[in-house]
Image (cartoon, rainbow, N blue to C red):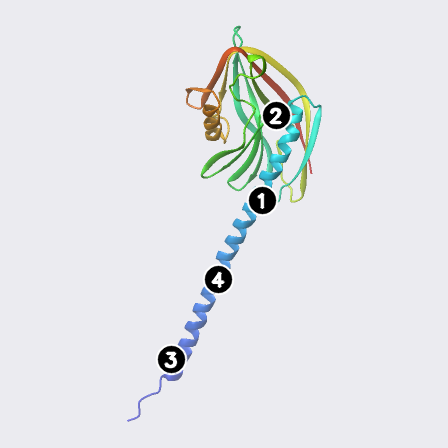
Amino acid sequence: MTRPDHRGASEVVSFVLVFAVVFAGVGVVQTAGLDTLGNVRDQHRTDSAERAFLTLSGSIDDVRRGAPGRSGTLRLGSGRLVVEAGPAVTVDDGGGNRTFGTGTLSYRVDSTSVSYASGGVFRADRDGSVVLREPATACRRGPANATIVSVVAFHSRRGGIDTDGPASVVLRTVDTATWEVDQVELNVSTTRNGPAWGRYLVRNGWTETAPSTYACGGNRTYVRRTTVDVRFVA
């Protein structure tokens, strides 16, 4: 009795299985490759934003120190440029307390942001926030044995901008006010960079008086607030 020959069927099954494995492998490699390329692209964008903000911070500092206006250009890609909340400032000048908000100019892409606030440049992501450039808010005696805390209050009629091309940031000084105070407090709970702010303030002479609240005071303490209008041009 002759046994049936199943070799042909086995070869077909093997052929199908091999191709199934090959196509599955190609799919996995393609998906992983696209994810990797996307991560590299986003990392490149945030790294570029860091460099751009470190450059732009010099122009904003000129405005903070009295220049009537400055401008800078950033390439956003898929990110968004926005003005959002910065630390809240409370000053006690002996006649009562006065509280006002400051502002943060931020570039956001996915879960990462690079920001400028009151002289400092910050980076924040899912893992936390870090200071890339220190703010102008150290609680230390300077010239003439005085402590000067300088903050920037950003205002923008257009809250933000997103565009694939370059975007210009036009900065104009609205006003400047200076107070001699007994004490100044910063509340950093209003900003995404709060943890980095807190670490910086403690290292630079501020005292933590409550969660996310830090105080600086003593003889001859001055708070200088520069209000800056921000305009975005695509």
Tell me, for residue 154, which label it has, or none.
Answer: 2
Give the position of the C terminus as an image quadrant. top right
Which mark lies nearer to you, 3 or 2? 2
* Residue behind mark 4: 27
For marks 4 and 3 on the same chain, the one whose residue lies earlier in the sequence: 3
> Tag 3, which secondary structure?
helix
Tell me, for residue 114, which label it has, or none.
Answer: none
For marks 2 and 1 on the same chain, the one whose residue lies earlier in the sequence: 1
Q: Position of residue 206 (x, y in %)?
A: 47, 20
Q: Position of residue 201 (x, y in %)?
A: 48, 24
* Residue behind mark 3: 10
Q: Is residue 188 above or below residue 113?
A: above
Amino acid type, callout 1: Arg
CA gap, disc 2 to disc 1?
Answer: 24 Å
Which mark lies nearer to you, 4 or 3? 4
Marks 4 and 3 in Cβ contact (< 8 Å): no
For marks 3 and 2 on the same chain, the one whose residue lies earlier in the sequence: 3
> Tag 4, which secondary structure?
helix
Amino acid type, callout 3: Ser
Residue 185 visible, this angle? yes
CA gap, disc 1 to disc 3?
Answer: 52 Å
CA gap, disc 4 to disc 3?
Answer: 26 Å
Quarter of the image holding residue 133? top right
Pick whichever, 55 or 109, lies toward us.
55
